[in-house]
Image (cartoon, coloured by chain):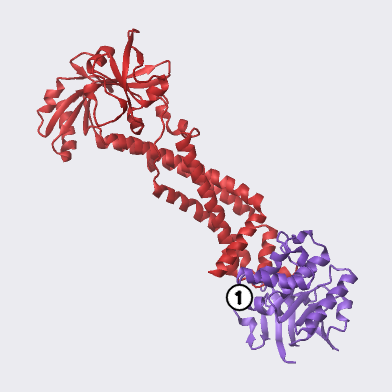
Amino acid sequence: MLRQLKILEFTLSSLLRRKYKNLSLITVYAFTIATLGSVLFLTHALKMEATGSLTTAPELVVQRVAAGRHDLIPTAYTEVISKLPGVASVTPRVWGYYYDSLIKANLTLVGISSYQGDLELLEGRLPDNAEECAIGRGVAIAFGPAIGDDLVLEDSGKSRTVFKITGIFRAESNLLTNDLVVLQEAALRDFFSMDQKLATDLVVQVHNQREIKTLAKKIKYNLPDTRPITRDEILHTYDTLFNWRSGMMLAVAVAALISFCILAWDKATGISAEEKQEIGVLKAIGWETSDVLAVKFWEGTVISLTSFVLGILAAWIHVFAFGAPALVPLLKGWSVLFPEFQLTPAVDFYQVFVLGFLTIVPYLACTVIPSWKTAVTEPEYVMRG
Amino acid sequence: MSQLIIVERLHKIYHRHQPDEMTALQDISLQILAGEVVALTGPSGSGKTTLLSLLGCMSRPTSGSIQLRDSNVAKLPERFLAKIRRETFGFVFQQYNLVRDLSVLENVMLPLYPSDQSLREIKKAATAVLDQFELAGMLKKKVKQLSGGEQQRVAIARALVADPEIIIADEPTAHLDSELAQDLLQILAVLNAAGKTIVIATHDPSIYQSSLVQRRFDLRHGRIVEEHSR
């Protein structure tokens, strides 16, 4: 123990002796970790936001498909579906998208009777007449209005409709509510000129969760122009979007390649003639091979751990304090029309551990192995100067 | 004086069974007594440094034995050789072989890091030996800032910090002027008077012809061709 402490002390002074080389190495290494960490943090946070918001989503949604595209569904389908064994209830939902050219963002307008889940308002209340609305935080930030102010929307006929804002949603539900404008259903139908006999989709509640897939098949059989979507299928879609099998895997592979390049560079430069001479001197004056390797091991550990901690810290700040400006255009391309939103910090520690393992261990190996080659050589050559 | 090192039928061949095979030492046999000052002389390439490195356990012979007191060090594993180098030998190299970016004190502390002593004890021992060589005023100076003579003294201090029984010195005056060479001889004389055994490889007559050297082995082409005793 005492011996290791003394060797650690020697290692730290060795690192300080080559401070400029080591600082540049730490900078490059930490940058790599920060890039990797940012990708992991961002994708995980997005996934958590997405999957978290789906916990209150309906178990089964039925859409109508016309010419391969989502179309409005007749409310009469409600009766057909309600008669299927196992169906508890069928509720038509009315919602739609609204593009605002002023803020260059896509908003989601939802009729209040179609409002599902237990999303909480940050302040205020939900609208209780056709001239009121509740809005997401992103909409509030984009337009700048507060409770009591007016929100002006322009319908397809170019006539402007004014809604008084009665509530703003909480930040925790950002992904679901950030772009949301909740109106009375009648007001929404009026705004979109939507027929009373049509709805955007139908929400189906079932008695037994295990029957969802069977019911989806039955709905499709009875109403061939529909597309039943289960909550699991939506979750699966999010998984495919964000998990290892998609962008993450690619990002990790690219970052691992960068890591490998650094290590290869470090290894290619190898240990200098000066370092070889130093190892020879240490061996000649009585250091054992294991002592020399311990110095190199501690050197590698200090460099890689410092870089890792700095990189992870930088990644955290980059993603959760600044909103990942370097990665958002790459990973959130589908949401460019959303108003800006702040990610809720969420970290998968298993991923961080894997990242640490994949970057620290190879670096340690690349530090120790070349030194080992020199350390096992007889120190006689030192005598020769 | 008792026999400290007994070398018998020592051979050293580099790059054995390879096209560039080179025989450095052939059939070397000698004895070194405790407290003796021995010089290995001969022209460049005669095998002085190779023999010195074998005696100092820094490499292994191809064949033959090196008896250090009771053990044949030629057969010992590297781990034990490191311990012997650390505890029994003090090395003064031709090029000093100091770690240039370390301070004077840190260089002298180096041999004691793997010992059982605490850092405080190591610092104390290093400071004491540096004090003997009038280097106490430059403990924190980097060795690259020192003159040749000062570096030589630091190298000797490092060789002595673990209080070794045997001093191995390879061409210790090669980079010193005659005045500094005389200073070094005086230091070696003091060490010998203190009971240290000294083995020097040199082709400097001011060393091997000095009264300090009691025996001299003259080497040519890896063989001892002559032994001079005083």
- Across and down, in percent, residue A263 comes to 56, 51
Quarter of the figure with the C terminus of chain A: bottom right
Is residue A376 visible in the rendered image? The answer is no
Residue at 60% over, 69% down: A289
View extreme (bottom): residue: B1
Q: Nearer the viewer, residue B195 or A288?
A: B195
Residue at 77% over, 59% down: B144
**Up-down relation of residue B153 to residue A123 (above or below):** below
**Up-down relation of residue A280 to residue A67 (above or below):** below
Q: Which chain is purple?
A: B
- Across and down, in percent, residue B7 comes to 71, 86
Q: Which chain is red?
A: A
Quadrant of the rendered structure where residue A18 is?
A: bottom right
**Up-down relation of residue B119 to residue B188 (above or below):** above
Is residue A314 visible in the rendered image? The answer is yes
Please indicate whether residue A244 sits to the left or right of residue B119 in the image.
left
Q: Nearer the viewer, residue A280 or A319?
A: A319
Please indicate whether residue A138 sits to the left or right of residue A75 in the image.
right
Q: Nearer the viewer, residue A108 or A200?
A: A108
Judging from the image, what secondary structure is the residue with disc 1 in? Answer: helix
Residue type at the position of mark 1: Glu
Q: Which residue is mark 1?
A: B78
- 10 Å crowding of disc 1: few (<14), some (14-19), many (20+): some
**Up-down relation of residue B186 to residue A363 (above or below):** below
Residue at 46% over, 30% down: A329
Chain at numbered mark 1: B
Quadrant of the rendered structure where residue A114 is?
A: top left
